[in-house]
Amino acid sequence: MNRFFLLISALIITQWSYSQIHEFGVMVGGSNFIGDVGSTRYIAPKNTAFGGVYKWNRSPRHSFRFSALFTELEGIDNDSDDPSRKLRGYEFTNDILELSLGMEFTFFDFDLHRPGNKSTPYLYTGVTVAFHDNYFFDSRGVYTPENTKSQAWGIPAVVGYKTTLTDNLILAFEIGARYTFSDELDGSVPDTKENIPDLSFGNINNNDWYMFTGITLSYTFGRNPCYCNF
């Protein structure tokens, strides 16, 4: 019986080693926030964002992808084109750690085991969760910590373009929006646990968004994958 389990384990390990190709990489770029505080421009990277990415390339046309991204989101009303925001003069910053899991689809075959340069546009979507601190603006407009934390779940919508630099290095440029199911990132709908009056403001029908614009550089390894059953 023990020999049987050892044989099965060896077959699984061999299949894993020989039937997939993997990528590990770094992500570097900029982020910007879209919500009830600050600029309303959609693509305006201003704060440094960095992290890591892992991909399991299941076929030349799609990959399962996991990433971790850290950045500081910032909103400054004086950067807005909206006169009412300029008059209000609110500002906020909030550090977030984003974890994302989903699937990447390429427009053209991206078979890393064929010789020559390869490049293709791609799309990525899935689910994200952003861990962040909670804040609120008090009655004087002072940005105040709640000393609590929350998670903002969301959906990423990413478009990019990637190309091979060498047999093992891949460079990609991407722009991605994250639509969240939260309106708490900028403190406009605070999740206060204290005995204070309602301090919500802004459009309560619109949740918060944030953007990542940048590059990824990844190293790929693994044997020629089997694409036959997926």
Image (spheres, rainbow, N blue to C red):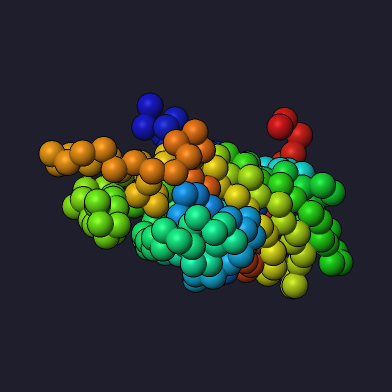
Name the residue located 60 percent from the left edge and 50 percent from the top edge: 177
Q: Nearer the viewer, residue 108 or 46?
A: 46
Tell me the quarter of the image containing the N terminus: top left
Q: Nearer the viewer, residue 60 or 174?
A: 174
> Toward which corner of the image does residue 228 lie, by quadrant?
top right
Along the line of sight, which residue is nearer the eye, 131 or 209?
A: 209
Q: Is residue 68 visible?
A: no
Picture quadrant of residue 24: bottom right
Q: Is residue 78 left or right of residue 17?
A: left
User: Picture coordinates of residue 44 (x, y %)?
Assistant: 61, 65
Query: Is 145 or 14 nearer to us in this picture?
Result: 145
- Residue 97, given in percent of the width and then of the height, sits at 39, 56
Estimate the x, y position of residue 11 in percent, counting from the top left: 54, 39
Residue at position x 25%, y 57% in the image: 140
Name the quadrant of the C terminus.
Answer: top right
**Number of marks drawn:** 0
From the viewer's perspective, is residue 6 above or below residue 32? Answer: above
Q: Is residue 126 left or right of residue 224?
A: left
**80 shown above or below 185:** below
- Res. 5 in view: yes
Q: Residue 28: which quarter of the image?
A: bottom right
Judged from this view, the residue extending furthest toward the top is: 1
Residue at image position (34%, 41%) is: 200
Residue 123's spot in the image, x, y percent? 71, 47
